[in-house]
Amino acid sequence: MSYENILVNDKGKVRIVTMNRKSPLNPLDMDTLREIKDAILNSGNRAILLHGANRAFSAGADINNFLKLTNDTAGVFAKEGHDIMNTIASYPRPVIAAIHGYCLGGGFELALACDIRIAHPETTFGLPEVNLGILPGFGGTQRLRHIVGETVAFGLISTGKRYKSDEAYRLGILNEVSENYLEAAEKLAEELSKKPKESIRLIKHLLRNPPDDMFEEEIDAFGEVFAYPDREEGVKAFLEKREAKFQD
Ligand code: COA
């Protein structure tokens, strides 16, 4: 697939995906989301870093397309959006969002589908869809509720409130706030790209799914991870007082 809305750059074991739409705030249309999905799925890399060129991570789904949607086609649109967000959320490698400028609506939902969020202090966050007479349709209601709890999520989504990185960090939405958000994200991506891949895959799977059945799954996953050679290398390296060298 050739890309018109994103740039892809592989650095070591990290794939850097840059949203680069002609419009400066990176509004997300379905073509852009499909390209992001393709760039992630067709990566042999051990970690993905997603960020935006120009003035923003993304100011949301492309509002220009909304007038054309009917209640039938809006459902199809949301379904494909969900599938793409779920692809990112269930991708077995860590996906890190490096965020600046604006992270609104579908852009915020995209960031919420990632595993780690690192933002510049002056970033504006929010799910403002209610003020367009619609609602978040790419998984944002559920993912935000999962992170901040039902009470806070209802307050934020029903008002469409916008807030800065300090509040997003206080609410647990962000892992880190930094003037050097992109460098911090690259450093973490590189660190995670060297971790044992089966452990990362299973940790992500356990954290990404609802807790009901996950205690049993954790027991199974703990057993499973002992089948991989990285476990032996990790344990031996500790005992031999050296740095572990995990498999490519
Ligand atoms: N979809 C499509 N285009 C968008 C967009 C979106 N979600 N958000 C911004 N843009 C476009 C603007 O229309 C404008 O285009 P133009 O230069 O052709 O006129 C360009 O991006 C710059 O936006 P502008 O509003 O002029 O910048 P600003 O700095 O004054 O304001 C925002 C920035 C983010 C506060 C404002 O653009 C905004 O509120 N956007 C909508 C956010 C939103 O509701 N997102 C949820 C969508 S579901």
Image: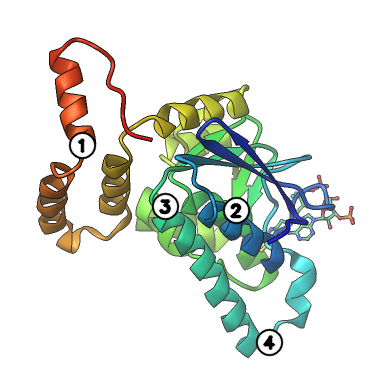
| Residue ID for mark 3 | 152
- Residue 3 found in image quarter: bottom right
In the drawing, what numbered circle is on residue 248?
A: none
Q: Amino acid at mark 3?
A: Val
| Residue 45 screen position, x and y as percent | 49, 42
| Residue 200 screen position, x and y as percent | 32, 41
Which quadrant does the C terminus fall into? top left
Cα separation, mark 1 vs mark 2, equals 29 Å
| Residue 228 screen position, x and y as percent | 20, 42
Nearer to us of marks 4 and 1 is 1
Q: Amino acid at mark 1?
A: Pro
Task: Mark 1: give few (<14), some (14-19) or many (20+) Cα within 10 Å.
Answer: few
Cα separation, mark 4 vs mark 1, equals 53 Å
| Residue ID for mark 4 | 70
Nearer to us of marks 1 and 2 is 1
- Residue farthest to the right, as pictured: 22
Q: At 73% from the left edge and 58% from the top edge, which residue is drawn?
A: 2
Residue 11, relative to residue 130: is it above or below? Answer: above
Q: At 23% from the left edge and 34% from the top edge, which residue is drawn?
A: 230
On the question of residue 160 being in view, the answer is: no
Q: At 43% from the left edge and 33% from the top edge, which residue is drawn?
A: 193
Task: Mark 2: give few (<14), some (14-19) or many (20+) Cα within 10 Å.
Answer: many
The CB of the residue at mark 2 lies under 8 Å from ligand 1 = no
Q: Tell me the element at label 1.
A: helix
Q: Tell me the element at label 4.
A: loop
Left or right, 76 with respect to 221, comes to right
Nearer to us of marks 1 and 3 is 1
Cα separation, mark 4 vs mark 2, equals 30 Å
| Residue ID for mark 1 | 229
Between discs 4 and 1, the one toward the N terminus: 4
| Residue ID for mark 2 | 39
